[in-house]
Amino acid sequence: MNAKASLPTGSSLCAETRKALSLLKHQIGLVESEAVTLDELSRFGSRQNPFENESKAYSSQIEAFQRDFKDLLEWNCTDAEIGGLYVPRPRGYCKTLLVLPPAKVIAGPETLCAKWRAEKKFTVWTFADGALNEKIRNDRRHLGMYALLHKGGRDADAELRNYSWERAQSDSIETMRATEVLYFEDVNFRRKEEHLDPESVTITSSLDSDGYAVNVNWYGNVNVNQYDVRHANPSYGPRAAVFL
């Protein structure tokens, strides 16, 4: 291109291009003003109803979690609180719902470990006995009550085996964190009387305060361990998650 050649101006653009740019500017303005969310805009671009409430498809499962909160966690989740729950749209193979109660109910992974010890159903071993909540601080607890979707398998996702924590991060794969995996263990055991990861180890996206990845497995008891963020193993892998 000639260095002296002038770039096209608004007046020299064709009418269809100007119309498209004007529409794009309008859409950006709607997002910036929060009149339309990025999720709604994404649904529209995918030819989906942008204002459809995805939680309708999961209403029976949400009600089951609401009962669990009351019966097993002794927390009465009101209809208003559950009515404001945002459920993301399924993405890929992530279609199994998990609803996390707020931090006042489950403050972190240690809450669940203490619960299991009190119930004396099975043994729990952790690398920071009694202090997991202090060692693991990046567990989305600031979100309050929230929902996410995941694959729902008993073992870590086959598609992500041999992924290290570092590789999942570099590939921008959102995965389940420590509290989420342990709560899924609790839910799964109550409903099916079987433990997660009998053949694998789940590498969560949580880091402990020493910079290690937190992983979870069942080898005779629930184990919460530390793992180098760069290490990978064919039996180890994360669990993909969608929460936005």
Image (tube, rainbow, N blue to C red):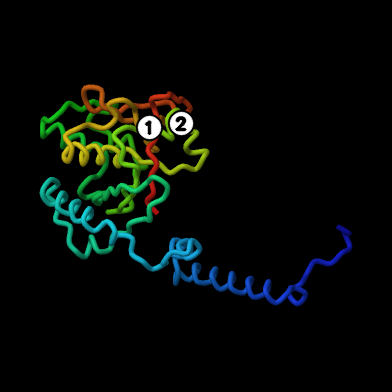
Residue 200's spot in the image, x, y percent?
A: 33, 27
Q: Pick the residue in front: 183 or 97.
A: 97
Residue 142's spot in the image, x, y percent?
A: 33, 51
Residue 163's spot in the image, x, y percent?
A: 46, 31
In this rendering, the label closer to the viewer, 2 or 1: 2
Q: Secondary structure at mark 2?
A: loop
Residue depicted at x 78% and y 69%: 8
Please tell me how crowded label 1 is: few (under 14), some (14-19), or many (20+) other residues with Cα within 10 Å.
many
Q: Pick the residue in front: 130 or 84.
A: 84
- Quarter of the rendering containing residue 221: top left
Q: Which mark is residue 174?
A: none
Residue depicted at x 22% and y 45%: 106
Ranked by sequence position, the earlier of labels 2 and 1 is 2
Using the numbered discs, state the Cα–Cα distance from disc 2 to disc 1 in whole angstroms.
9 Å
User: With respect to residue 65, does 215 lie above or below?
Assistant: above
Q: In which quadrant is the N terminus drawn?
A: bottom right
- Quarter of the rendering containing residue 111: top left
Q: Secondary structure at mark 1?
A: strand
Q: Which mark is residue 163?
A: 2
Please state if 102 lies on the left or on the right of 228 as rendered: left
Residue found farthest to the front? 47
Query: What residue did someone put label 1 on?
Result: 203
Residue depicted at x 14% and y 56%: 76
Q: Pick the residue in front: 65 or 154.
A: 154
Q: Amino acid type of disc 2?
A: Tyr
Please state if 230 lies on the left or on the right of 107 as rendered: right
